[in-house]
Amino acid sequence: MSTLLWILVGILVYAVVATLLKNRGILPASVKVSGPLTTIHTVRGKKFLDWLAQPKRFWRAFANVGVGISLVIMFGTFFVLVFQAIAIIQSPPTETAFQNPQNVLVIPGVNEFLPLTVAPEIIFGLLVGLVVHEGGHGLLCRVENININSMGVVLFALLPIGAFVEPDEESASKADRGARTRMFAAGVTNNLVVTIVVFLLLFGPVVGAISVASGASVGGAYPGSGADQAGIEQGDLITGIDGERIETNDDLISALESNEETTITVDLRDGESVTVERSMLITTLAENSPFAGDDGVSIDETIVSVNGASVATEPALRSAVGSDEVVTIETEEGTTAEGPLGVFAIAMDGGPLAETGFAEGDNLVIVEVDGDRTIETQDIGNALEDNEPGETITLVVYDGDDREEVDVTLGANANDEPVIGVTNLQGLSGIGVNSLGVMPYPSETFLSILGGDVGGGIGVVLLFLLILPFSSLILPDVDFNFAGFVDTNVAFYDVAGPLAMLGDGGVFLLANLLFWTGWININLALFNCIPAFPLDGGRILRTSSEAVISRLPIDDKPAVTRAVTTSVGLLMLASLILMIFGPQLLN
């Protein structure tokens, strides 16, 4: 039985038991049950809110700022959801892990992006987000003299999924439109404040105490590769190759590209050394590579020869290619494929290469740049390093089977460096090979994002932080997701500075708490700003629509308000359904 099915059975059992207990009067009156949903009501805390609400002028000013921010986010989410829905209808994407039903559930251990190991941190962040969100509503209720009947939390089975403040309907109806709008926006405002505070703490003292450990981080080993057979696995840290010191992932790549030995000794951080037999395993393959297709090579095959010469290392492969532009590749599985071997690239619209007659999106293989043979992507940069923008060079390019020799006038990028107008560069004609067989873990990239060191403004930083848990689906060249500092990656980081007194575990726990608290709060703020009832965005839309429609020369103003809010709400619901289930429904 699958994990998801076990959970559904557990939820059903919980609903039956909770309903029986409630019907028999065993549960207290403050607990209400509706299927798998349980609400716990309390009146405690009302006096504290009355005391906290005393500087009413300050809280109204603060809430007015929150209303402005909420309106901006609300309009932003509206247009993003609508445009995304239109894009899905026009060009249905292939189904991804996002649309997997178990990943729609925000349950650690069930959702593949939310590992069970950080469940306590996720639940903590969720509780903080719910408390401050509903606390904001409760505080502004008292600021605006709206009575509160009760407050509490909402449980889905045993998992807290929401909180609530239950205003007194009579006093709420007496409040003016501005007071109600401020009250509706207060929860979102509080979530945004918490997000800013915890991320500032994360960016500053916490991430500042964490550094990337010396060595090459191993995210995993490809099945059947030399590393896999030697026992190298996820979480290992490679510190040396045949006695050569390895400080970073780039050092590992450089060492493999220069080492011609087919049998090498790999040193690990724990002091262990293992012997690895290298082989040219194909790990990635561009869809339009001249070596792809029904008669071409495939991922997980192993290249054993090029032009009849045996190859097991990167230097041997390059030597076997030599100056030949068209080569024959043979794999251990018996596949033989022939084609131009060079740098696979896509022509850019309006770029220097496109001006010679190539169209935007043309799949090309660049085998020579101004007399220099180009096999790997860095070969193009090396060939252009002595050139300046505006100079004319000669390229040898294959467009399918057609060989063309073209003169290109170099353009310039933002750094005034020479460019030929191509994108998506991949060496070896789009064949990705790995002679060691390890998947490098982007430890430095993730730490930079956590520290806010990604360039751009706060919006860019927040965007990168939001996508970290599913970064492998969005960030190019990143094959891993980041859910915090967990067992599979803590070996890649060291702790130093004043916070070291907390120990590695303490610092990593603090970083996880801050990350997930900020991540959940910003998501709560964005989700609640969707202009659809019963979300805060839907309530703000209603009061805003009332304010506008009240000034129009029409008779039935309430009916027009309902029409506007209902139409927008249904549009948002349809957009969300398309985003989640669109690929299955339309493909």
Image (cartoon, rainbow, N blue to C red):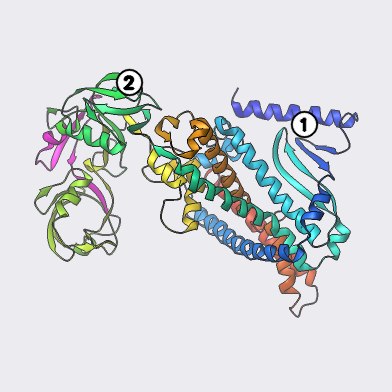
Q: Where is residue 320 in the image (x, y as percent from the top left)?
A: 12, 33
Q: Which image quadrant is residue 417 in?
A: bottom left
Comparing 462 with 60, the one in front is: 60
| Amino acid beneath label 2 | Gly
- Numbered label tally: 2
| Amino acid beneath label 1 | Ala
Q: Residues within 10 Å of mark 1 (few under 14, many from 20)?
A: some
Whichever of callouts 1 and 2 sits on the residue coming sooner in the sequence is: 1
Residue 282: numbered disc: none
Label 2: state its secondary structure: loop
Q: In which quarter of the image is the N terminus?
A: top right
Magenta highlight range: 317-346
Query: Which residue shows up at 58% across the image and 37% down it?
Result: 101
Task: Name the residue tied to disc 1.
Answer: 15
Q: Position of residue 370 (x, y in %)?
A: 11, 54
Q: Is residue 335 magenta?
A: yes
Q: Can residue 112 be seen in this view?
A: no
Query: Which residue shows up at 13% across the image and 63% down it?
Result: 392
Q: Can residue 271 be seen in this view?
A: yes
- Viewer-nearest of labels 1 and 2? 2
Residue 271: numbered disc: 2
Q: Position of residue 189 (x, y in %)?
A: 65, 57
Name the residue furthest bottom. 553
Q: Which image quadrant is residue 66 in?
A: bottom right
Label 1: state its secondary structure: helix
